[in-house]
Image: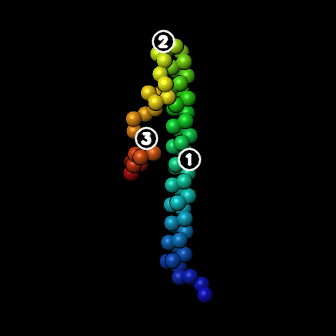
Amino acid sequence: MAQPYEERNSAARTRRQQEDQRRMEFRRAIEDRCERRQLLAEIGDFPELELNYWQAAPATSRRNAQPAR
């Protein structure tokens, strides 16, 4: 038996939301990695400022931030 239209539409919407969420998590991970690489490159220009990874890591994670609407 065919699913009612609302049920199919809801399932498709839920699937799209989950795909969007995975895409955004992946995008944020790429952005975080690029920012850290840039920071480490900038730090490399000043060898007297020896920072370890934990000092260079941001205090709050961008992944925990809510997107603006």
Q: Residue at x 55, y 29 (%)?
A: 37
**Percent of width and height locating residue 68:** 39, 48
The circle drawn on residue 48 is 2
Nearest-to-viewer mark from 1 and 3? 3
Relative to 51, residue 27 above or below? below
Mark 1, Cα crowd under 10 Å, few <14 / some 14-19 / many 20+, is few
- In the image, 68 versus 60, the foreground residue is 60
Q: For the residue labelled by badge 3, is the local secondary structure a helix, a strand or a loop?
A: loop
Q: Amino acid at mark 1?
A: Phe
**Percent of width and height locating residue 3:** 56, 82
- C-alpha span from label 2 to label 1: 34 Å
Mark 3, Cα crowd under 10 Å, few <14 / some 14-19 / many 20+, is few
**Percent of width and height locating residue 23:** 55, 51
**Percent of width and height locating residue 44:** 54, 18
Q: Residue at x 39, y 39 (%)?
A: 60
Q: Residue at x 50, y 72 (%)?
A: 10
Identify the coloring. Answer: rainbow
Q: Quadrant of the N terminus?
A: bottom right
Q: Amino acid at mark 2?
A: Glu
Whether the residues at callouts 2 and 3 have beta carbons within 8 Å, the answer is no
Q: For the residue labelled by badge 1, is the local secondary structure a helix, a strand or a loop?
A: helix
Mark 2, Cα crowd under 10 Å, few <14 / some 14-19 / many 20+, is few
The circle drawn on residue 39 is none
Going from N to C along the chain, the mark reached first, 1 or 3, is 1
- C-alpha span from label 1 to label 3: 14 Å
The residue that mark 1 highlights is 26
Q: Amino acid at mark 3?
A: Ser
The residue that mark 3 highlights is 61
Q: For the residue labelled by badge 2, is the local secondary structure a helix, a strand or a loop?
A: loop
Whether the residues at callouts 1 and 3 have beta carbons within 8 Å, the answer is no
Nearest-to-viewer mark from 2 and 1? 2
